[in-house]
Image (cartoon, rainbow, N blue to C red):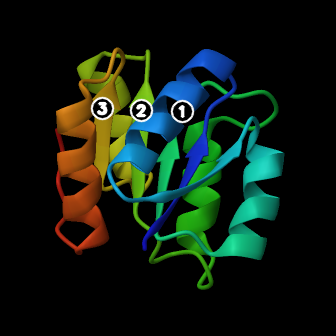
Amino acid sequence: MNTALVVEDCLTDRETLAICLHQNGFEVITAASSEEAREKISNYKPDVIVLDVVLPGHSGFELCRELKANPESAKIPVVFCSNKATKLDEFWGLKQGAQAYLTKPVIAEKLISIIKQVVRGKTQSV
């Protein structure tokens, strides 16, 4: 079973994403901040990270850049899931090393399709 880390500061969004992933065969761990995410990544080595952009402390962009610069986490696919919905936000997210950028509200089928693709190693920008 693949493990997904959902990094989202909004409890409702975090739980919604976690339930969706769990119902589609993922073991799910969650974090509410970039600091908590670093700890979970170190302890659990997830197969994919679903990451919000706006987080307390460091942004999702900063966390993604940090993960991609670290050899221990560089190969973990990152999928941004954010309210920030401009083309510039998407461009910037992919520039940080993410495999995909989805905007909220997320359509569950689209999320699962993208997550499965990136876990299999297919880069997908949406």
Closer-to-camera residue (107/70): 107
Residue at numbered disc 3:
102
What label does residue 111 carry, if any? none
Report the Cα–Cα distance between label 3 and label 2: 5 Å
Question: Contact, CB < 8 Å: mark 2 with mark 1?
Answer: yes
Assess disc 1: are there few (<14), some (14-19) or many (≥20) residues with their C-alpha within 10 Å of its C-alpha: many
Q: Which residue sits furthest bottom?
A: 71
Where residue 48 sits in the image (x, y, percent)?
45, 62
Residue at numbered disc 2:
81
Identify the residue at image location x=52%, y=42%: 51
Mark 1 or mark 3: whose residue is earlier in sequence: 1
Where residue 33 sits in the image (x, y, percent)?
76, 38
Where residue 117 sits in the image (x, y, percent)?
19, 62
Report the Cα–Cα distance between label 2 and label 1: 5 Å
Question: Contact, CB < 8 Å: mark 1 with mark 3?
Answer: no
What element does badge 3 sit on? strand
Quarter of the image for residue 59 reads top right
What label does residue 52 carry, if any? 1
- Examine the rendered structure and indicate whether residue 122 appears above or below residue 53: below
Three-letter amino acid code of the residue under disc 2: Cys
Identify the residue at image location x=25%, y=46%: 112
- Residue 114 falls left or right of residue 94: left
Question: Contact, CB < 8 Å: mark 3 with mark 2?
Answer: yes
